Image (spheres, rainbow, N blue to C red):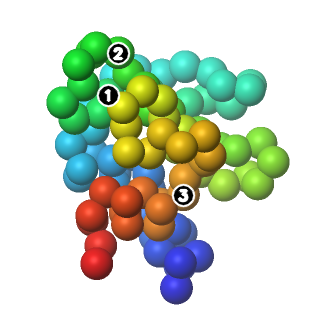
Amino acid sequence: PIERFNAEHGLVELLARAGYRVAGRCVINGEPATKLLRPNSDSGIPGAFVYRHRVSGKEVVFSHGADVLNDGRPHDAWDVATRLGLVT
């Protein structure tokens, strides 16, 4: 079920549903990435990055700052949906 959910849901789409805003593009570890600004950001600096993980090959999001997704590891769509309350 989790793999199916991940295949059917893009991270940028899920993050947008949770109030994140696309704030540009960049390159991380040679991979194109989408930068996002978390809701209620104090700094106004995008701190979430969605890109294809070079080891797993899966789309993941990393974040920093006060973001709930900031725990030092990559998150897939299922992680994002459950952590941000988009699924029960």
Q: Is residue 74 above or below residue 4?
A: above
Determine whether, in the image, residue 56 is placed left or right of residue 2.
Answer: right
Q: Gap between marks 3 and 1, in whole Å?
A: 18 Å
> Which residue in the protein does label 1 denote?
37
Density class for disc 2 (Cα within 10 Å; few <14, some 14-19, many ≥20) is: few
| Residue 50 seen in the figure | no
> Which residue in the protein does label 3 denote?
76
> Which residue in the protein does label 2 denote?
45
Q: Gap between marks 1 and 2, in whole Å?
A: 7 Å
Which of pointers 1 and 2 lies earlier in the amino acid sequence?
1
Density class for disc 3 (Cα within 10 Å; few <14, some 14-19, many ≥20) is: many
Q: Which residue type carries mark 1? A: Leu
The residue depicted at 52 percent of the width and 68 percent of the height is: 6
Which quarter of the rendering shows the C terminus? bottom left
Q: Nearer the viewer, residue 65 or 9?
A: 65
Marks 1 and 2 close (CB-CB < 8 Å): yes
Q: Which residue type carries mark 2? A: Ile
